[in-house]
Image (spheres, helix red, strand yellow):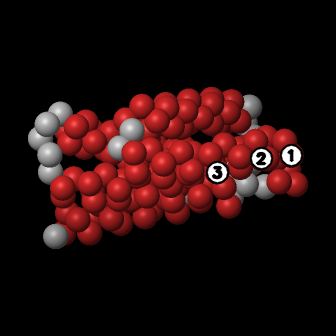
Amino acid sequence: MANTNALSAYKETRIRTASQGQLILMLYDEAVKQLDSALALLALNMSGKKDPGRIETIGKAIVKAQDIFTELMVSLDFDQGGDIAKNLFALYTWFNKELLEAHMAQDLTRITVIRNMANELRGAWGEASAKTRAEGRPSEGLNIAG
């Protein structure tokens, strides 16, 4: 129990002290992690080892990823982000719609596409964040759309 509390305190401190760019990266990391979990469980379910309990766990992982994309949507700054913010909003909306439909259809391919796209976006944010740090600018300058 003490380890759980220590881990929880560490995670909370990490989030509170993170820059905006780091927070965005954390959100993408968690979305990819949740989609990886859903994909692994879905693959197990489809491999002939049917387990109805997995369906609920898969659903929870997908909903967590959708919640993350929704959080990214509401954090967009349309005044500063312009077309980038609009495009990201449309993309996150599509992610959520596609994940809903993919979950209902138990479609590994569609979930994989979203997972890979989220991972690519994470990489782009990582590069932008690193460039911002290298230029000595505060991470808040990274707020082009999120």
Sequence-first tag of 1 and 3: 1
The residue under the point 35% across, 66% down is 9
Q: Quadrant of the N terminus?
A: bottom left
Tag 3 secondary structure: helix
Which dot, 1 or 3, sits closer to the camera? 3
Image location (x, y in percent) of residue 92: 63, 48
| Residue 82 disc label | 1
The residue under the point 53% across, 45% down is 98
Residue tagged by mark 3? 93
The mark tally for this picture is 3
Tag 1 secondary structure: helix
How much space separates mark 2 and mark 3, taking CA atoms? 12 Å
Residue 88 lies, with reference to residue 123, above or below; the image says: below
Q: Mark 3: which amino acid? A: Thr
Tell which of 118 and 99 is nearer to you: 99
Sequence-first tag of 2 and 3: 2
Tag 2 secondary structure: helix
Please give left or right for residue 143 compared with residue 20 in the image: right
The residue under the point 39% across, 38% down is 107
Residue tagged by mark 2? 85
Instruction: Answer whether residue 21 is visible to the viewer in this image.
Output: no
Q: Mark 1: which amino acid? A: Gly
CB atoms of marks 2 and 1 within 8 Å: yes
How much space separates mark 2 and mark 1, taking CA atoms? 5 Å
Which dot, 2 or 3, sits closer to the camera? 3
Q: Mark 2: which amino acid? A: Ala
How much space separates mark 1 and mark 3, taking CA atoms? 17 Å
Residue 112 lies in quadrant: top left
Tell which of 108 and 61 is nearer to you: 108
Decide: few, some or many residues near mark 3? Use Cα within 10 Å; few <14, some 14-19, many ≥20: some
